[in-house]
Amino acid sequence: MITAVIFDMDDTLIAWAESDLDWAAIERAHLRGVIDYLTREGLAAPDFEHLAEVMEVRTQAAWHSADITLIAPHLGHVLVAALIECGIPAGRIDERACLRAYGWNGLPGVHAFPDAAPALRALRARGLRLGLLTNAFVPMWMRDRELADLGLSPDLFMSRVSSADVGYLKPHPAPFQRVLDGLLAAPEETVFVGDNLRADIGGARQIGMKAVLRRSADQEPPSLDGPLAPHASLTSLAELLPMLDEWEKDSKQSTVDS
Ligand SMILES: [Mg+2]
């Protein structure tokens, strides 16, 4: 019996496709906040252009090696290392204060899929426990702000995990286990919904969950064979609850038949 549903965040609950973001400009605006904070603290703030350059190189390096190692990059750790490289004494750097100064929120053009909030509420009303697992560069407390800005209350989810807080990215089993622990759920009674075959579907299947692919209407339905094959796919989250009901009926029927 399914008792919990875990969602990926980006391109599963939140739509990025229509956004056209200048990431370099966004990053620079956030770094200005850090420089202002350091100045307020009486520290000799590093040269802005130098810090921006060091951050870019370190961020790219962290994601590049993560592709192979699945070790999750963490904005706070990268930022602290960059500040040290720029000459700020390590003992004077408060990572959490730097992240608060960096700031994080919903971005222009990014929105929650219109089917997300109604589907989440319907699943909760059915008594299912909800979780969220994101391969994110920022810790979950920062993504919580983003969820709230996008109209998806973090309180909808009993367990929310960012890979940055765990140290490993999906499809590594560690972040899946962390979110399951928060839900007090076993993998066999859990469904994972995500848009990425390797990270979401492969990772969820490997740990023993049922895996559902969220795809856009113009994407071909996936093959339902092989280690990265989902158990099902859907183009709207409104299809999820009827799908779970159907599975429940089938599993009751197969118990009766045997
Ligand atoms: Mg995703």
Image: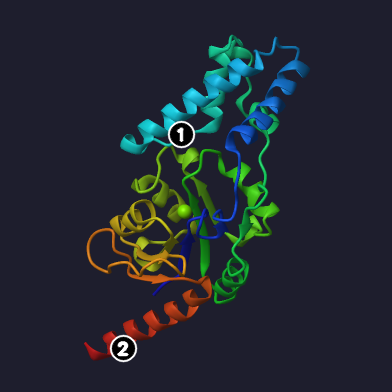
Image quarter for residue 205?
A: bottom left
Q: Is residue 205 above or below residue 91?
A: below
Residue 40 or residue 106, whichever sits in front: 106
State how many labels appear: 2
Image quarter for residue 72?
A: top left
Can you identify the residue that label 1 sits on?
73
- Cα separation between marks 1 and 2: 45 Å
Point 53% across, 75% down: residue: 238
Type of amino acid under label 2: Gln
Mark 1 vs mark 2, foreground winner is 1
Can you identify the residue that label 2 sits on?
253
What quarter of the picture does the N terminus occupy? Answer: bottom left
What quarter of the picture does the C terminus occupy? Answer: bottom left
Is residue 14 in view from this perspective? yes
Q: Mark 1: is the Cβ under 8 angstroms from ligand 1?
A: no
Type of amino acid under label 1: Pro
- What is the secondary structure assignment of the residue under circle 1? loop
What percent of the width, then of the height, locates residue 176?
A: 40, 51
What percent of the width, then of the height, locates residue 9?
A: 52, 54
- What is the secondary structure assignment of the residue under circle 2? helix
